[in-house]
Image: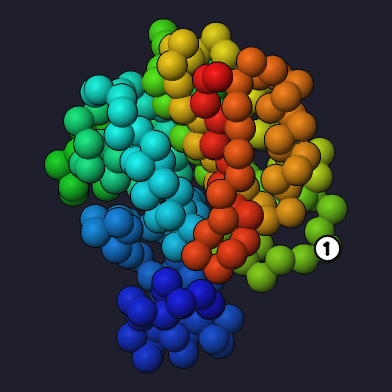
Amino acid sequence: MDEYLKRQLSKEQRDRLESGEPIQKVITEIDFYGYPMEVDLNVLTPSLETEELVSKTLFHLYEFRNPRVADIGTGSGCIGIAISKEITSTVEAVDINPKALEIAKRNALKNDASVIFLEGDLLKPLTGKYDCIVSNPPYISYDLDSISVINSTPVLALFAGTEGLASYEAILSSCKEHLNEKFLIALEIGELQGKRLLEKVKKYLPNSRAWIEKDMNGKERFLFVREK
């Protein structure tokens, strides 16, 4: 259990988690970037790193005026909702799981957030051009034998093929047609995936500049891509 969750839990909730009860049955609402978010077995419980992704994305978006933002694999809607509340923007959020979108829509209503929700796979539902694509996609390899949250997390939100890189490749290989000339791509990544993802950026977006940023624990957890 990470420190982000420990700060929000009662002793009873911690005991239930330590006894093996799935996290989404113990915790039905969390605070994310200062906003209450419903979570359940259909969505990931957002982590502290995902809050950092939002913070870093907002910092890099400061020079955009009323950016059009696409939140890919939105899950509970936390990323898109937080961005829409923090800056003047147009946010569209995509998820392939209709049950996740139901939760995201309730979270948007709860937070009085203006977010457009689209059902579909990654970038396929997008229309027009965007200033920013932000995503915390599935990035755990199917090769792993076990993982502690497998029984309490939707598989679609967790695992990806090609050693966990499939979702990133799908995004990077098709994003150009959805981006304005001036753009930002912001992705949460696995701590050992940065080097390979930088190579994929060179392959699919050779005229861009990309860099990795570390989380507060010094781990390489964020990939950003901009126009040159």
Instruction: Identify which residue is drawn at 43% across, 33% down.
Output: 71
Instruction: Identify which residue is drawn at 79% across, 50% down.
Output: 142
Q: Is residue 109 visible?
A: no
Residue 218's spot in the image, x, y percent? 59, 64
Give the residue type that dot 1 points to. Asp
Scheme of colours in the image: rainbow
128 to the left or right of 162: left
Instruction: Identify which residue is drawn at 60% across, 21% down.
Output: 208
Q: Is residue 169 visible?
A: yes
Q: Residue furthest left?
A: 112
- Residue that numbered label 1 is attached to: 145
Q: Where on the picture, by quarter, is residue 146?
A: bottom right
Nearer the observer, 227 or 68: 227
Check disc 1 and report its element: helix, strand or loop. Answer: loop
Nearer the observer, 105 or 213: 213
Q: Where on the picture, by quarter, is residue 89?
A: top left
Instruction: Identify which residue is drawn at 45% across, 44% down.
Output: 75
108 to the left or right of 207: left
